[in-house]
Image (tube, rainbow, N blue to C red):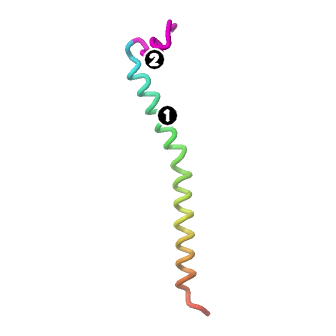
Amino acid sequence: MEFNSLAEFIAMGRHGLYVWLSYGLTALIVTYNVMQPALHRRRLLKEQAQRLRREKRNAPSA
């Protein structure tokens, strides 16, 4: 497929909205799937640190 201008490339033969929306949605989903484990791990580590501090504070002094 050959395009004569950037505008024709973006329009994609009048299918541009569908094409670029599909690419954008795919990029958004892939980004979310890549970032989610890292965010979940950070939250888990923070919760565990808080739990350990709370247990240490509430432990009876022996």
Q: Residue at x 38, y 14 (%)?
A: 14
Q: Amino acid at mark 2?
A: Ile
Mark 2 surroundings: few (<14), some (14-19) or many (≥20) residues within 10 A: some
Secondary structure of the residue carrying numbered label 2: helix
Q: Residue 9: x and y, percent? A: 48, 14
Viewport quadrant of the C terminus: bottom right
Q: Residue at x 59, y 91 (%)?
A: 61
- Mark 1 vs 2, N-terminal side: 2
* The stretch drawn in magenta includes residue 8: yes
Tags 1 and 2 touching, CB below 8 Å = no
Please state which of the two labelled residues, at mark 1 or mark 2, is closer to the viewer: 2
In the image, residue 19 sits, relative to residue 44, either above or below, namely above
Q: Which mark is residue 10?
A: 2
Q: Residue at x 54, y 51 (%)?
A: 37
Figure quadrant of residue 10 = top left
**Outermost residue to the bottom:** 62
Magenta-highlighted residues: 1-13
Name the residue that disc number 1 marks: 27
Q: Residue 24: x and y, percent? A: 45, 31
Q: Amino acid at mark 1?
A: Ala
Q: Residue 35: x and y, percent? A: 53, 46
Mark 1 surroundings: few (<14), some (14-19) or many (≥20) residues within 10 A: few
**Outermost residue to the right:** 62
Q: Which mark is residue 11?
A: none
Secondary structure of the residue carrying numbered label 1: helix
